Amino acid sequence: MWRGGLSGPPGRVGLSLVRERPRTAACGGRRRSDADRLTVDRHPGRTGPGAILALLDADDADHARAVSVARAMASERRPGFITNYVEAEAQALLVRKLGRTIARQWLLAGGLPVIPVLAAEEQKARDILARHPDKDWTLCDAISFALMDTRRVRRAFTFDHHFRQYGRIQVLGLD
């Protein structure tokens, strides 16, 4: 069953539908993805795959927290965006977790602007990974770090502890 999402200007939060599934024992034990991240600042904020999943799936363990933070972001008029990397990663995650129909609807709805990552940001991401061989950061994590550094985005709403490890970003959502 589906129900309406958050109020506020379209595209501010990027949520229009929330999936509610019958609760079963199989649904209760899901773990959140390491890809969870949604960033916000006075500049546009970056939204990540796991945060998108948490917003769309009412059964997700982080759904209530994600909705609360998204509402706060919308009330503060902090616009969001996703990178082209996150768009691909989010669509793949949604296919796996919610099915191809929901994933396609989300992709084609275009709730948040897609910001292409610059070649210089991709190189900076590789440099970040090279400097931190002890971390399990993905290329998508490092691209997020590089983009946020380059574009001066300083606050992040995320369930991904990697953003706290990086240390240059005020992390919301893990508090």
Image: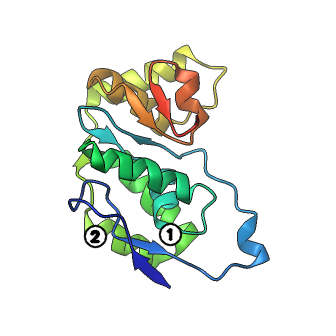
Location of residue 52 with respect to 59 vertically, above or below: above
Mark seen at residue 108 = 2
Residue type (three-letter) at the residue carrying disc 1 = Val
Residue type (three-letter) at the residue carrying disc 2 = Leu
14 left or right of 9?
right
Location of residue 170 with respect to 62 vertically, above or below: above
Q: Position of residue 15 (x, y in %)?
A: 35, 63
Looking at the image, which is closer to me, 115 or 139? 115
137 left or right of 127?
right
Q: CA distance from mark 2 to mark 1?
A: 13 Å
Whether residue 49 is visible, yes or no, is no
Q: Residue placed at 26% from the left, 26% from the top?
A: 151
17 left or right of 150?
right
In this figure, which residue is indicated by the disc labeled 1?
95
Q: Position of residue 101 (x, y in %)?
A: 43, 80
The tag earlier along the polypeptide, 2 or 1, is 1
Q: Residue placed at 53% from the left, 40% from the top?
A: 173
Q: Residue placed at 57% from the left, 31% from the top?
A: 162
Furthest-right residue in this view? 25
Q: Residue placed at 24% from the left, 58% from the top?
A: 11
Say which quadrant the C terminus sits in. top right
Looking at the image, which is closer to me, 117 or 2? 2
